């Protein structure tokens, strides 16, 4: 039930009520207008208010199980059979994965869910493996809803810290959540009494085809026609974390060209607030959401994921560089042009220098190892290519925002500290915001040439639409960690396309 | 050779020289320090200056053809055989494509390249096709380089208007540029003397597998475990436009859930400037680029694509809405919270209202049809979900920026006018910037409930890295046009996953 400035709080939770008659899609049939507080130490309801009589939305059109839906179905999708004649290009040994030029470990934690660690890439020219990512995982997911009324304002969820990304990881459905050529890894979590619980198909690993790695067609040389295109195979590590209504599809994509692309996709069910309103014309005051169906408000909210990225670029001692792109005006008549842009690189000396709001001013954000240079003298590095960013809209002094203050910037860099893993604090339920990334970084520690951690906030402001109802088609976002002067040159210059093969029994 | 304020200009071009000995990768072996101007009417060299003696970069490590590369090759990629037992899910009839719930036309134009038109989606509930995109194509691509020196400052390319996206479209290589289950469409362009030229495999169409359409696992109902996941099949229409050194992979992705995702990916070869510098330590002044190899500067530049998107959302008469997300501070003690955010929707009345810089202030940009409402009264619409935007860095009064002034905003909306197709003007070579989107919109025409065109600028600021050399792994960006209250509810709620099939000859 969050924290709203109380000095002391008891171990209490708020309870929501739903109608489960005639549907399994309970979240779209809320019984609104009731407030129930349960004290977990007394195991008793300690507050009950029936504040309002609100219509419960209909069960009609809420069913999402094919086995319970009736025809007509459509549109129709055709099948594709895939087969890898020499098997997949990866090998899983326990939790260690080897694939093409990558090696890494897939860990699993009750709080973080999937953890990628010890990711290193083999450098064909240097004849050795070089470290990239010591450890990467989603540290927290902050989902504040935007209805200030008493029956909704406490919905400011911290899904990793309050529920557990690992505890909320669900079994993947073969041939549905992952293609038929995927391999699965099981994991263990624990039940409330501490006994181990097998989680089947917690993670899947598969190769994705269909893209180009690089190409060129050359028509500029007289009497020659040159074309070369190399097909790309990517590796995807997928898990699905379902925290109540929402399903978070968490992908880690690896590319032979050295990039790591973490992607988030949202599906599942909107958090609905019941209303007596059946048509937009009846709306007289701010509904705090979209009327997505009769009697159903899809309440405005945000999804802020924060990634913990302990990059170890070619070694543990790294620095964080911000390269600004700056306009230069030419006034001395030295060029026919009046302007151009150039770059200005600053090394972030302390944590304050590395608090970045991604916005209008273009810049390249790079983690570099200044102790390692390329042959022509560039620092080896990896660059962050972000998705369109989301910035917090709550006021800084609002209680949920104090607890979720790690969203104040899109990028943060801290010196490695083994106690600093959870951006919203170690104990998040009822937290007062005194143990967040925003608090730690007030120490303004030195981050030059140290073992550093980059934190990256990926966000979606969610104004629901009718298409999100009664279950939401994927809404996705992704960012890229891309080698930047890490290799001497394109590391896949000599990577061949997979061989064309024709399986004997499979006609063209 | 661009325009730099001259009142009159002749039909002149600048000529670059390259070494083609021992490599076909000519762009990385420039002979810098020479200026040559050719008068196309006289067909004569009218200026020649040998301004500097600059080393020509080595041919070593520049070869990109597998047939001319020597071992070791790697890393290795495994093959995948794919087969669609019932054939593909799409049908191509001439230039018309039917697929799942979509129908559209693939046109081809010497200037624009691929044109998607008359795209409509079948609404299973309304039992009819509904229009979405009347016409969409890339109107211009502006690539200004950022070296003010006389041998580089004229490189401010307008690839569609100066070279032609259609004329520069190259044949796709089966099994490399497109997967083995793709189908190809040929097209015709013309040679300099007007005779028709067959362009084989100008476009490919294929279905992409591997993603989830929507899913949910429900664990909140006592004694029940519910899981449902639907596999997504997407349709991709791909072409490759190679303008000199760069290869632009132009994808149009269609989703059964109603989204259209245009994507751009860059590959090909950097524009290199020769230098006598072999190591970064020798750099004494701004190199205007990255030392990507000895004697080789990868010059800073931008890629600004502008899409022409004549959306016809459920009819021709549409409006453009900007929904701002605004913080509301609570000061009256009516909530335990101190703030929340809500939305404020404004209809853009004229072209000036619709000039959008995408940046810090979050907003939802939607093309709506206010003449058509959903059952609960929302205007039907499609929303733009942009990638991280790029803003121009040249000064507004600089000649290249006057010509490329359509990059001044990320989104523009104009009333449909059949003469306004080319954002940089009809005649771009040596243009003075008097016929651009920025000029047209000064009329500030009414755009409410009219046939309107949305223009969207997708940009990449390119600070080259050594990995881009000698040929660049794909760098991609994409945006989404997503139905927003267009359908009554999730339009793929009753779309089944493709059937699991096992081809008899293909062992699991």
Image (spheres, coloured by chain):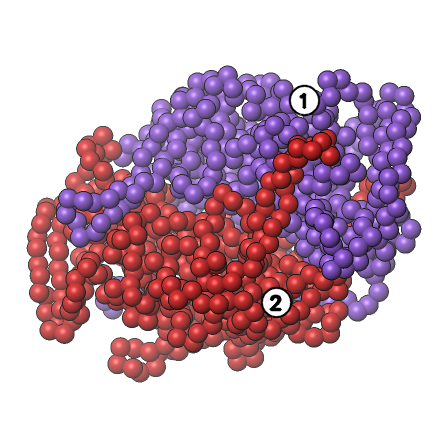
Chain colours: A purple, B red
Q: How far from the left and from the top, in percent, is residue B264?
A: 45, 57
SS type, badge 2: strand
Q: Give the residue drawn at x 39%, y 66%.
A: B443
How packed is label 2: few (under 14 Cα within 10 Å), some, or many (20 or more)? many
Q: Is residue B477 visible?
A: yes
Look at the image and tell me in which quarter the C terminus of chain B lies. Answer: bottom right
Residue topped by disc 2: B369
**On the rendered structure, is A123 left or right of A10?**
left
Residue at 44%, 54% (x, y): give it: B410
Which secondary structure lies at badge 1? loop
Q: Find disc 1 in the rendering and name its residue.
A: A432
Residue A20's place in the image compared with A414, above or below, is below
**Position in image of residue A39 (x %, y %):** 86, 24
Q: How many neighbours does mark 1 have within 10 angstroms: few (below 14), some (14-19), or many (20 or more)?
A: many
The residue that appears at 83% across and 52% down in the rendered structure is A276
At 47% from the left and 33% from the top, the residue drawn is A356
């Amino acid at each position: 039930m969050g924290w709203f400035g109380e000095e002391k709080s008891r171990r209490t939770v708020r309870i929501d009520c739903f109608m489960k008659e005639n549907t399994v899609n309970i979240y779209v049939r809320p019984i609104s207008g009731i407030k129930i507080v349960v004290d977990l130490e007394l195991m008793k309801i300690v507050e009950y208010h029936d504040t309002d009589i609100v219509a419960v939305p209909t069960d009609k059109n809420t069913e999402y199980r094919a086995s319970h839906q009736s025809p007509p179905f459509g549109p129709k999708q055709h099948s594709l059979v895939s087969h890898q004649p020499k098997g997949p290009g990866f090998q899983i040994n326990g939790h260690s994965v080897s694939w093409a030029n990558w090696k890494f470990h897939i860990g699993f934690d009750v709080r973080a869910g999937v953890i990628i660690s010890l990711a290193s890439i083999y450098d064909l020219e240097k004849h050795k493996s070089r470290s990239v990512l010591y450890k990467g995982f989603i540290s927290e997911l902050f989902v504040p809803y935007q209805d200030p009324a008493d029956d909704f304002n406490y919905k400011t969820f911290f899904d990793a810290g309050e529920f557990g990304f690992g505890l909320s990881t669900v079994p993947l459905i073969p041939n549905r959540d992952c293609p038929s050529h995927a391999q699965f890894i099981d994991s263990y979590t624990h039940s409330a009494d501490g006994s181990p619980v097998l989680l089947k198909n917690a993670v899947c690993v598969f190769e994705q085809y269909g893209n180009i790695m690089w190409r060129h067609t050359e028509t500029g040389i007289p009497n020659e026609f040159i074309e070369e295109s190399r097909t790309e195979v990517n590796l995807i590590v997928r898990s699905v974390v379902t925290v109540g209504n929402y399903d978070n599809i968490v992908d880690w994509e690896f590319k032979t060209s050295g990039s790591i692309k973490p992607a988030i996709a949202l599906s599942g069910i909107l958090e609905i607030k019941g209303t007596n309103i059946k048509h937009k014309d009846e709306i007289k005051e701010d509904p705090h959401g979209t009327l997505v169906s009769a009697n159903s408000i899809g309440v405005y909210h945000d999804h802020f994921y924060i990634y913990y990225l302990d990059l170890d670029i070619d070694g543990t001692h790294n620095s964080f560089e911000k390269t600004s792109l700056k306009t230069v005006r030419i006034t001395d008549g030295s060029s026919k042009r009046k302007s151009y842009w150039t770059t200005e690189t600053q090394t972030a000396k302390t944590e304050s220098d590395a608090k970045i709001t991604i916005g209008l001013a273009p810049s390249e954000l790079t983690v570099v190892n200044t102790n390692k240079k390329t042959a022509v003298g560039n620092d080896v590095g990896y660059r962050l290519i972000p998705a369109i960013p989301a910035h917090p809209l709550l006021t800084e002094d609002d209680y949920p925002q104090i607890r979720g203050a790690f969203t104040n910037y899109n990028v943060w860099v801290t010196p490695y500290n083994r106690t600093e893993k959870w951006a919203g604090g170690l104990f998040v339920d009822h937290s007062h915001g005194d143990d967040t990334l925003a608090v730690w970084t007030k120490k303004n520690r030195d981050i030059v040439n140290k073992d550093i951690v980059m934190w990256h906030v990926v966000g979606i402001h969610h104004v629901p639409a009718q298409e999100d109802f009664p279950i939401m088609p994927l809404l996705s976002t992704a960012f890229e960690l891309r080698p930047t002067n890490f290799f001497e040159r394109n590391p896949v210059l000599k990577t061949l396309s997979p061989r064309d093969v024709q399986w004997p029994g499979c006609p063209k």
